[in-house]
Amino acid sequence: MRFLEANGYYNVVGLKRLFAIEVADYSEKETLLHEIFAKHRVGSSELFALDYDLVQQLLLSFEGEVIFPEQKNKEAEFDKITKAKNSNQKFSFYRKGLKNGDEVVFLKDKTIVAKIVGEREVEYGGQRWLLSPLVRKIFEDRNQVNDSGAYQGAAYFCFDGRKLKDLPDVEL
């Protein structure tokens, strides 16, 4: 352990192994990764502070054999990570197939209707809103704000009877 720490590996015993791939031309790829992620290096160690999914997706794009965890299909894992990253994107009416002028209805009170006026904006009460702040405002007006005060707006509005968050994405 002292040898490793003396050569730039700090406290690697406490780290959990999540993914490993065996590649040809290892030293060239390692040099490339060091150049790409230089700003994310932890001190002068061999450790980098990076998003796990980003690193796994990058490594899966290399030619090589996944050696940990064992039963991993490279293409399926790459697609799964890409899909998960895309699902974390900000909500877009257009991506859900809605357009300006469409109306969305508040699930807890069908009398509250907002009109879509942009990719992420609605008009309600003469003002333009993003969905989450509008939901918070509605709950504030009803004295029903949750403890965190945070809301996922697309979970509180629906279009044609379906929650916005449950609408499938369409090709743009």
Image (tube, helix red, strand yellow):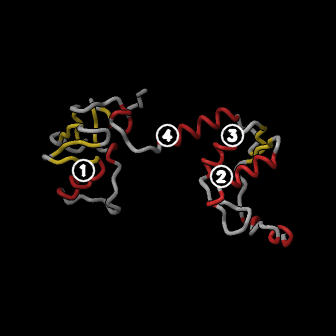
Q: Residue at x 28, y 46 (%)?
A: 131
Nearer mark to the viewer, of 2 and 4: 2
Contact between marks 2 and 3 (CB within 8 A): the answer is: no
Q: For the residues carrying marks 2 and 3, which lies nearer the camera in this image?
A: 2
Q: Amino acid at mark 4?
A: Asn
Confirm or deny contact between disc 2 and disc 4 (CB under 8 A). no
Residue at image position (17%, 48%) is 127
- Between discs 1 and 4, the one toward the N terminus: 4
Disc 2 is placed on an element classified as: helix
Drawn side of residue 70 relative to residue 90, left or right: right
Numbered disc total? 4
Residue to which mark 2 is pinned: 36
Give the image quarter of residue 116.
top left
Mark 1 and mark 3 in contact? Answer it, CB < 8 Å.
no
Q: Earlier in the sequence, mark 3 or mark 4?
A: 3
- Residue matched to label 4: 86
* Residue nearer the viewer, 33 or 138: 33
Q: Which residue is mark 1?
A: 134
Residue extending farthest left: 126
Tag 4's secondary structure? helix
On the image, the x and y values in percent for residue 28 come to 79, 47
Query: In which quadrant of the rendered image does the C terminus lie?
Result: top left
In whole angstroms, how far apart are the C-alphas of marks 1 and 2? 40 Å
**Residue found 37% across the figure and 39% down from its top:** 165
Image: 63 above or below 127:
above
Q: Earlier in the sequence, mark 1 or mark 2?
A: 2
Identified by mark 1, the residue type is Leu
To which residue does mark 3 refer? 60
Q: Nearer the viewer, mark 1 or mark 4?
A: 4
